[in-house]
Structure formats: structure tokens, C-alpha cells
Image: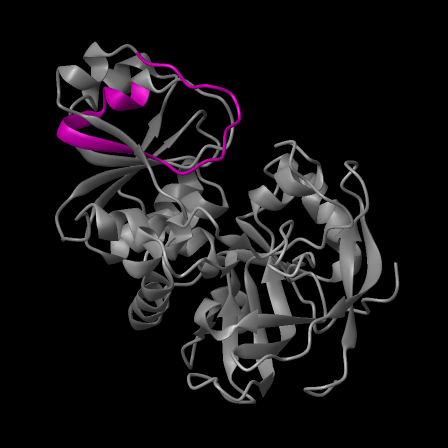
Amino acid sequence: MGSLEKERTTIGWAAKDPTGFLSPYTYSLRNTGVEDVFIKVICCGICHTDIHQIKNDLGMSNYPMVPGHEVVGEVIEVGSDVTKFKAGDRVGVGVIVGCCRQCSPCKSNIEQYCSKKIWSYNDVYPDGKPTQGGFADAMVVDQKFVVKIPDGLAAEQAAPLLCAGLTVYSPLNHFGLKKSGLRGGILGLGGVGHIGVKIAKAMGHHVTVISSSDKKRDEALDHLGADAYLVSSNADAMQKAADSLDYVIDTVPAHHPLEPYLSLLKIDGKLILLGVISKPLQFVSPMVMLGRKTITGSFIGSMVETEEMLDFCKEKGLTSQIEVVKMDYVNTAMERLEKNDVRYRFVVDVAGSKLDQQ
């Protein structure tokens, strides 16, 4: 699959324009540098952000674009200065593949907040070459942004944890919300939300799922293990739940009001925004002033937190609820994800797919 000297090519499935339609695309990978890990992709989760990117919803997309940032693969080759990994290891790659290493966030090991971070796709390396993601046969990634997948954690189960799982774990960790006995809310029961329920329960929290309808009540309570279910349009139920939660993790990736969920928080409670929303959100200031409440956000997590989160999920036996598909189904999967027609995360079986066939 190439050598340290010879430039190699790989096949991925790329969007060529803002229709977002994915099809086979051959491109070159850089040679394995001294700090690099050459990875053969096993599988890759599909994140809602992939849709935003391939369809240019944020106005920053460059084509051709190979998406995918929940990547699990096998190490094929490592550079001479790589110390953490060896050929044959199962590893993961998430949302970021580079940072400046000089700024305050980088020096504080929160490189996800580096202003010069390099995204795993739809970005460029310092040499000007585009980054491409995990809907592909292989990737070459700096060892700093590669993480070992714990033994006993299946590849397809680990993949969604690298973005969705980390996105929930990091704010709970950072804001001191890991201790047992807290009461938390999970707003939105999609890919991030369902893992959020499981992680919060494993931390010993009383977990309320908040949704716009009753449709997911049985799933939330019976299958995911939530303690309570709240329909946001039910004014009486929302009133009864007022001032009861230490935090609400808001995973909704579309415009929505904040005030109904601020009302659920205790004094000093936190509303933590995790959904990517391009339109401004609104609230009246007394909603936060009169309870000293906080509206905050969080973005994925650090590499240190990624390792912690994977170990935590392995220790607690946490699994994602996934639907595994082949690459030739990926366009249909994207359409279904847009309609929230998945329980709860698609994972593409990349290694088991014929990437050169439409």
C-alpha cells in the first residue's frame, strides 16, 4: 500500500458540488512523514455536520470533498518518530488533524480551540493540499491526532464516540458535571443525544430526555435507560419540571427557542449548546439573570479527553445504537439522516465496501 518514498493514491467517496451527492474519487495521499500514521480505514460514522459540509450550508465548502470524521482503522505504517502506535493497532481519527502547537489552547491541551486547527476534511494542510476524510480507503494523519481504540470495543461501536461521544463527554468533564447524583436533560434524541443519555446515566445522573413529541418516549425510557421524558410542547409538564435540572445538553442542530429550556434549570444551571446552527438564537435576559444561569457551548473535545472518553465507555460497557451500511448506500443514508430517519447513527463499513463502484 505504498512506501515511505512513493506517493500513494487512494479512493474515497466525494461530493463534487453543493448537491452533496457522493461518488468515487481517486486522489493522492502524502507520503508517511516522520510523525505520521498511515491508516487503512475500517469504518466511519456519519455525522449531521457531514450534511452541512457536503451541501455548503455554512458557505465554506470546497470540492471535491471526501467527508467523514468518525474514523476507525488499522495502522499500516508509521513514521520514524512515531512512538504511540505500531502496525496492526486499531486507531481512531476524529474532527481535527492539525493545530499550531504554539497558542494558549494548544499549550493547554485543548487544541480543539486553536484558531489554526486543521479539520479532517474540507480544509488545507500548511503545504496547501486539501484534507480529506474517512469515507475513503486510507488516511495519513499526524500521530498527535490519532487515538488507540481500547481492546474489546468494536470498531463500528467506537466510530460514533469519536465525535458524538466526545462532544457530550467534554462539557460534562470541563464544567464539573461528572459527579454522581446530578439531574440532567438531553434535548434532542439523535446521534449525539442518544450517546449523551448513555454517558450521563453511566456517570450516575438522573436523565430527562426532552423532545418535541411523544414519538421517542418508549425508546428513551425502555431502550436507552432515561429516567424521565418531557415533551417540550406540553406546557403543564414543562411547568412542573421548572427549576429541576443542573444542566441541559442541547443537541438540536436547527433553529429553536432557548427560553423553554432555560426555565428547566436550577440556579446556576447550564444550558450547553452542541448543535451547529447558522441563524441567531434569542432569549430575554431575565431568564438567565434571575437564576444566575449560563448559556454556553462546547466543541468536540481534546485528544486527552478522547482517550479518557473511550476508556470510560469501555469500562462502563457503553455502546452506540447504530445502523451499519455499505458505501453504495451512503447517499440514501444522508437523505435519511436529514429526515432523522436513523436510530441513531449510521456507520459506513468502508473496508467491506467496493469503493470504486457507484
Residue 32 spot, x, y in % from top left: 63, 80
In the visual, does 181 lie left or right of 67?
left
In the visual, does 93 lie left or right of 121?
left
Q: Is residue 149 above or below residue 212?
A: below
Q: Which residues are magenta?
A: 260-283
- The residue depicted at 17 percent of the width and 48 percent of the height is 176
Front-most of residues 91 and 214? 91
Residue 9 spot, x, y in % from top left: 79, 73
Residue 131 spot, x, y in % from top left: 65, 58
In the visual, does 243 lie left or right of 156?
left
- The residue depicted at 76 percent of the width and 46 percent of the height is 63
Quadrant containing the C terminus is bottom right
- The residue depicted at 48 percent of the width and 86 percent of the height is 81
Front-most of residues 115 and 221? 115
Quadrant containing the N terminus is bottom right
- The residue depicted at 39 percent of the width and 43 percent of the height is 220
Residue that extends furthest to the right in the rendered view of this protein = 357
* Residue 244 visible (yes or no): no
Q: In which quarter of the view is residue 19 placed? A: top right
Magenta span has 272?
yes
